Amino acid sequence: MTDDLERVRDDVLAAISAADSLAGLEAVRVAELGRKGRITGLMKTLAGLSPDERREKGAALNRLRDQVAAALEARRESLARAELETRLRSERVDITLPHRPQPDGRIHPISQTMDELIDIFGEMGFSVAEGPDIEDDWHNFEALNIPAEHPARQEMDTFYLRERPDGSRPVLRTHTSPVQIRTMEKMQPPIRIIAPGRTYRSDHDATHSPMFHQVEGLLIDESTHMGHLKGCLIEFCRAFFEVSDLPVRFRPSHFPFTEPSAEVDIGCSREGGTLKIGSGGDWLEILGCGMVHPKVLANCGIDPTRYQGFAFGMGIERIAMLKYGIPDLRTMYDSDLRWLRHYGFAALDVPGLTGGLAR
Ligand code: PHE
């Protein structure tokens, strides 16, 4: 290659490596290899040379052109990569968000207890039923075999609402038993439901709140008897309190809507002034139950000569306080964050029979 061409080559290669953008590089290409470019111009001069000169200079020019083309391509690639990298860097989205702090919210012991009840009875085949908080006389009393003059009406300290135009007086339900009635009115046996929910009585002290929670249970079919009632509730008490040999006692009692009726006590000890659930020679009442009264079945359009079953009801606050050692009922409704952090449950601490109900 002649000195001339060598100078051109050094010059062009320097320009290529100095180009710092794709646009700048393209300008170099046009200036050298474009239609009016320098190397293109040199190619054109070949026409005026003798065949020998042309062959020699032609080969040298071709080499130069190929070298320049290769250098352009290499530089183009590296500039393109650099440009892409700059763009990727500038458009980068940081998906590595810092880990979220533990949520502060806690599950209230009442909600946790309801979940546990649903879990235990769900395992036995009960499904969850619901009813309204504002009830009529029929569902809260009459259909449950509690007539107007019955003393149970006074005992329940009912909240009455304003009279309706038709003369009826709605009440805030005093127990979850009206859900029994609503369920039986809607469906024929077999029935197997529990009904957790709010209940209201005009009563307020360390162990009573005007609003509290109950869970109702109802099982009706053709062959259910008192033995099933006992087995079901003994099993429940042992699962809920997580004491496998917990003593459970059925004491005769009375409810207008069950016959026979019983109250259930669980074993405990009160040694040294502290209450401990389990075998300790002492007893603690936790729920009411019985065989559904034939009149109640008939009131709901269920044939009492064909069907029978049992029902039970218990206070959720009461069993929650016993299980989790909460001494004062009123603190349940204070919405005190310190209390909730102490007695509440983590959101993901879902009750389950296999992993322990609550850890
Ligand atoms: N409803 C009753 C109460 O509130 C409890 C109960 C329910 C008793 C079902 C027997 C059967 O005290």
Image (tube, rainbow, N blue to C red):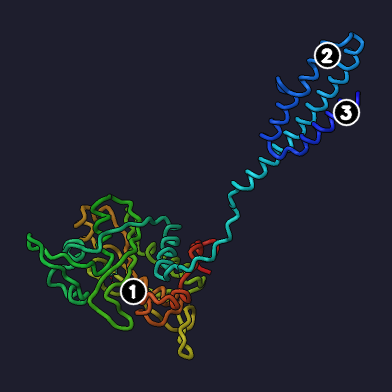
- Residue 110 visible somewhere in the drawing: yes
* Label 3: few (<14), some (14–19) or many (≥20) C-alpha neighbours in 10 Å: few
Q: Name the residue under label 3.
A: 6
> In the rendered picture of this protein, how many numbered marks are placed on residues?
3
Is 129 above or below relative to 81?
below
Which residue is pictured at 27% across the width and 52% down the height?
A: 306
- Residue 46, labelled with which disc? 2
Whole-Å distance between the Cαs marked 2 and 1?
118 Å
Q: Mark 1 points at which residue?
A: 263
Q: What residue type is labelled 1?
A: Glu
Whole-Å distance between the Cαs marked 1 and 3?
111 Å
Q: Element type at marker 3?
A: helix
The one nearer the camera, 338 or 319, is 338
Q: Element type at marker 2?
A: helix
x and y, in percent, of residue 164 in the image: 10, 62
Q: Element type at marker 1?
A: strand
The one nearer the camera, 358 or 49, is 49
